[in-house]
Image (cartoon, rainbow, N blue to C red):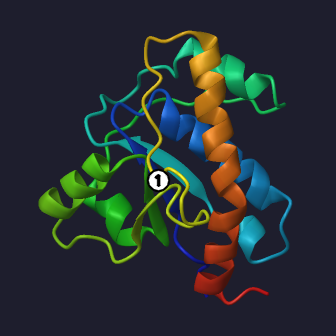
Amino acid sequence: MPGPGPIVVVCTANICRSPMGEGLLRHALAAEPQPLRSIPVISAGVAARDGEIVSENSVYALRKVGIDIKDQRSQALTQEMLDEALLVLCMTETHRAMIQVQANPAPKNLHLFREFTPPGSDREIGDPFGGPLKLYELCRDEIVEAVPSILAHVRGLVGAS
């Protein structure tokens, strides 16, 4: 019996936020028991060109916390990715709206990356593209803050305790 589909992390160009989200979620899932440990994580962009390198500052921001994403390459979000996904996590409401309008059918488990964080916290993760390393580190930290709530949601989806 095949395992659950992948978690798909989505941003615009798939060179800053979503590669960091992919790397951080993959790292967190690796520390979980089965079946969570086996859930694949991919990232893609709603306006990505295939094969672009991850932004240097995204690589540096994750390297500072021991995660290597330098070999990741951008890819455009496809209907197949959406159809197979266990969960689709967008960085902003704009990304979610684009998917809802363009996908046919739109995925059932389409959420913001920070949607499961406590009420009152900012739900969107801004784009650090072109900014200083400090901005990428702040973006990374917003992603890190959301990971435990995502893991809890995924446990509910796959029936893990």
Where is residue 6 shown, x and y percent of the image? Answer: 53, 64
User: Compared to 98, does 75 lie above or below?
Assistant: above
Q: Residue at x 63, y 29 (%)?
A: 138
Of the pair 86 and 127, the residue shown nearer to us: 127
Residue named by callout 1: 123
Density class for disc 1 (Cα within 10 Å; few <14, some 14-19, many ≥20) is some
User: Can residue 96 be seen from the camera position used here?
Assistant: yes
Residue found at the very far front of the displayed protein = 120
Mark 1, secondary structure of its residue: loop
Number of numbered discs on residues: 1
User: Can residue 70 be seen from the camera position used here?
Assistant: no
Where is residue 62 shown, x and y percent of the image? Answer: 72, 28
Q: Residue at x 55, y 36 (%)?
A: 19
User: Compared to 57, does 43 lie above or below?
Assistant: below
On screen, residue 122 versus residue 111, left or right, reads right
Query: Residue 74 is drawn in which quadrant?
Result: top left
Q: Residue at x 62, y 65 (%)?
A: 150
Q: Quadrant of the N terminus?
A: bottom right
Where is residue 111 shown, x and y percent of the image? Answer: 42, 65
On screen, residue 155 versus residue 114, left or right, reads right
Where is residue 3 shown, x and y percent of the image? Answer: 61, 78
Of the pair 32 and 121, the residue shown nearer to us: 121
Of the pair 157 and 134, the residue shown nearer to us: 134
What amino acid type is highlighted by mark number 1?
Arg
On screen, residue 134 versus residue 46, left or right, reads right
Q: Quadrant of the C terminus?
A: bottom right
On screen, residue 36 versus residue 14, left or right, reads right
Query: Residue 61 is drawn in which quadrant?
Result: top right
